[in-house]
Amino acid sequence: MTATTPSERPGTPAHSDDRVELPPGTAPSDPRFVNDDLLPVPVERRRWTTYNFAALWVGMAHNIPSWLLASGLVALGMDWKQAVLTIALANVIVLLPMLLTGHAGPKYGIPFPVLARASFGLRGANLPALIRAGVACAWFGIQTWIGGQGIFILLDKVFGGWSDAARIGGQPWTLWLCFVLFWILELAIIYRGMEALRRFENWAAPFVIVGALVLLVWIAAKAGGLGPLLDQPSKLGWGADFWTVFFPSLMGMIAFWSTLSLNIPDFTRFGAGQRAQIWGQTLGLPTTMTLFALLSVLVTSGSQAVYGAPIWDPVALAAKTDNVFGLLFALVTVLVATISVNIAANVVSPAYDLANLAPKVVNFRTGALITGVVGVLIMPWKLTETPELYIFTWLGLVGGLLGTVAGILIADYWILRRTVLDLAGLYRPDGPYWYAGGWNPAAVLAFAVGGVLAIGGSHSAPGKGPFPEDGLIPFLKPLADYGWAVGLAAALLLYTALMAGRRKSDDREVTLQ
């Protein structure tokens, strides 16, 4: 009856700061569910500090797609105040699930797919893990293409003639060369492991801030001061036109980091304690994204003042300078910024997720390589062609699905289990998380219902996206602009209700025995 017993049996020593680890010599060995990368991190190796987590977020937040978020809002008609408000509010909101799911990392030393076993089951955890991995692979492709494209544009400006090279697949072969070299560099860094990532993020974070500030100073000088950057009016006002854009944009901004709100345990499992991850993330995420958003919208507004139209791509804007030193500095900044976010946000997670799928044959390094290959094969660069497609379609879908998973994880870990897990049981098919053949039907049902409610009404304006104008499921169209919130709330409530009923049934069964 271990599969139906409602109580948790940690059976593992807890340290004075509530961190838990497996007793020596008791590591599970079932190759279907265990390898070295999925096992809990020993307490002595959990040493990431507040600065490490803050630096991680600074490094991840300062990247070209983050810049495109804010500048894209300006391109959609917001002024700088509206764009910064939208992004600041979104990142304060997404911080809460980030901290809630991140709690299991320092306490148990487990990655996201192992945490998901508590709610979805040992086999069922592959469902949210593969969804998260698929999203990360797409993001990896987007980031790598943007990084390679940035290198190409800047080198073409420095040396000239790169854009006139012979074309392969519709693109100059020099662009493909930049893309491939950048791809190899990223995988070489992540292949060295999480400790190398920590050291890279520590120095990359402040460097990228300096690069963004340099771009702001340059465009302000060309515009004749900060005045023209701040004076660009909103095309939406504060009436109905603004709110129509604001709510789907807010969900898109939340969706941007809804990916990390799931797999943040992949990083917090190395934390020295809860204080380190809570303060590190709180100081690192909303403050950094708001500052970067402010820099982005000011620079984009400046480009509108200088060139007559907003240039929402910072690489295209930097390429307008004729200063060789400035171009080379921009090139290095693009390299560091893109590598910083891509290997942290888009390789670490799928590496663990794919290892969870087949622990016997896939370890962390193999998973990272698979991520790199898949991220290229799906050719996701078209997703950033327009602000509408990037913010409303791509981020809206991602946010709806991942918000649903976050709702289930939070309900299970905080509401039902009160943060108490059987650590060894997360790796045993005879443990409390086996459910029905390794799957928890309640989690699957909550995910399905929450997912349909979140993205079923997805719609596009004529010629602006892939969905029908009236929505995939027309009567759900009013919910589509709130996809992340709808998915999280619906899944959390339904899963809690289903599991509360299951636990009452289990209690009666145990009493009868």
Image (cartoon, grey):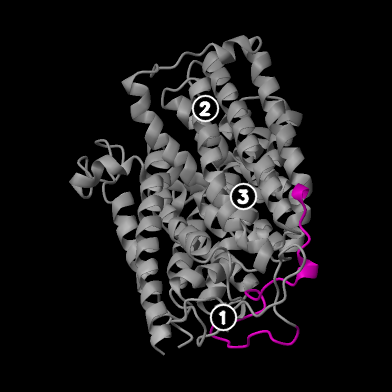
Q: Secondary structure at mark 2?
A: helix
Along the line of sight, which residue is nearer the eye, 100 or 352?
100
Residue interval drawn in magenta = 24-51
Q: Amino acid at mark 1?
A: Gly
Q: Amino acid at mark 3?
A: Cys
Q: Which residue is mark 2?
A: 85
Residue at left 46%, top 48%? Answer: 381
Q: Is residue 320 left or right of residue 247?
A: right
Q: Position of residue 23 (x, y in %)?
A: 73, 82
Dot 2 or dot 3, earlier in sequence: 2
Residue at left 36%, top 77%? Answer: 505
Q: In the image, which is nearer the foreground, mark 2 or mark 3?
A: 2
The crowd level at tag 2 (other Cα within 10 Å; few <14, some 14-19, many 20+) is some
| Label drawn at residue 425 | 1
Tell me if residue 26 is in the magenta stretch: yes
Tell me if residue 261 is in the magenta stretch: no
Q: Are marks 1 and 3 in contact (CB under 8 Å)?
A: no
Q: Amino acid at mark 2?
A: Leu
Q: Secondary structure at mark 1?
A: helix
Determine the main secondary structure of the stretch shown in magenta. Answer: loop
